Amino acid sequence: MAEILFLVHRAPWPPDRGDRIRSWHMFEALAKLAPVHVAALADGEADAALARAKMTPLCKSLAIEVRKESRPLALAQAVLNGEPVSNRLFRNAALKRHVDALIGQGGITHIVAFSGQMAQYMPARFDGPVLMDFVDVDSAKFGTYAEQDKRQPLNWVHRREARTLGAYEAEVARRVDASLFVSEAEAALFRSRSGLGADRVRAVENGIDTDRFDPATALEVVGTGDGPLAVFTGQMDYRPNIDAVRWFAADILPLIRTRHPSARFAIVGRAPTAEVDALAALPGVTVTGEVPDVRPWLGAADAVVAPLLLARGVQNKLLEAMAMARPVAASAAAATGIDAVPGEHLLVADGTDAMAEAVCQLFDDRAAAAAMGRAARARMIARYGWDARMAPLGELLGLPG
């Protein structure tokens, strides 16, 4: 009888951030194929407790260890050992012992690893199918960090991580049966870097729960005020999100307010850094911190904005906003990988002036903005159901659905 080992770098529940949304739906899809053993890390005891309460009845077995490695120590150890910092940050001896013992018992027939950091927990030799869901080409992300930030020692750290992690990603991909990425663009980039073909490197896209993200749902009233509201959602200790909201609040919003003096900007997401919190001092800016549900804020938005300078894969924040029938203004980087038509399903704009103009366009013509939102939702329903997106897993694992 088939049994699947699912290795995941953050326990999938609750699915309240991009990586956990994907890993949760992957877990659900795998559980329909065979009993699943989950071995995961968590960022804290509270996260681990939530995941254990939800997932224990759903798993064949569940092991969650809290990640405690500090970034400076991980960097020092990685440099000494010539390995990626990312691997050190997600290394846990107790979880490794658990995985080794579980595989040693002989019942595991298939392995699926989620996020490249979890490849270090896979056995060197395994007789059954092994899938590696890299999600994004993380090494490319660090390369972009290095290009954008020339300050030392950060530039050196990012360049080193791009190099060492890139080599590790390629080595892992040569060992597994298939490597998965969240978009065809990411898969194509990895093929060009690794030399592997489309038979070994596949796109398995993200989806969206259009029943949950439905504008007809009765939701709490939030974001009330006199002026039109732009909303950004995301994990607010994540560098690309921090850079995006800082740019919008400091440079783009003032341009919008020359035409819409009462325009407002809400930054909605957990774990805002001090840098993000400080943006609340700017005119029209609100920083909510963690909210129990992002849907009320999406529903309140006159425009959902994603001015990301760096984005990899498919942005769940945009899928959610579009499923909620909200008009979206996104950078080209943020929109990459989403199967939607600029000008019909969303607006795509790069640069301060262009992004300000796009948002003003949505604020100026509410009827046209609403029509764009309806077209966006229709596109999400037609294209991005989670069951359809995860369907290739059964084929790749050789398991009947």
Image (cartoon, grey):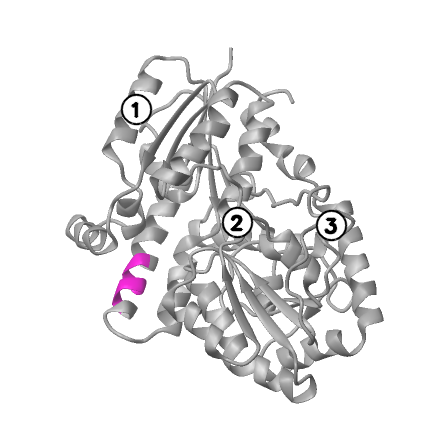
**Residue type beneath disc 1:** His
Residue 31 can be seen, yes or no = yes
Marks 3 and 2, how far apart in space? Answer: 17 Å
| 370 inside magenta stretch | no
Q: Is residue 318 left or right of residue 373?
A: left
Magenta extent: 156-161
Q: Nearer the viewer, residue 237 or 391?
A: 237
Main SS, magenta region, reads helix
Residue in view at x 26 percent, y 36 percent: 92
Secondary structure at badge 3 equals helix
Q: Pointer 3: what residue? A: 380
Q: Pointer 1: what residue? A: 98
Q: Is residue 198 left or right of residue 46?
A: right
Secondary structure at badge 2 equals helix
Residue 174 can be seen, yes or no = no
**Extreme residue toward the top, this view:** 1
Residue 11 point in image, percent of width and height: 43, 37
10 Å neighbourhood of mark 1: few (<14), some, or many (≥20)? some
Q: Nearer the viewer, residue 181 or 12?
A: 12
Residue in view at x 48 percent, y 51 percent: 136
Give the mark nearer the N terminus: 1 vs 3: 1
Give the mark nearer the N terminus: 1 vs 2: 2
When asked about the image quadrant of residue 147, the answer is: bottom left
Which quarter of the rendered picture does the C terminus lie within?
Answer: top right
| 160 inside magenta stretch | yes
Q: Pointer 2: what residue? A: 18
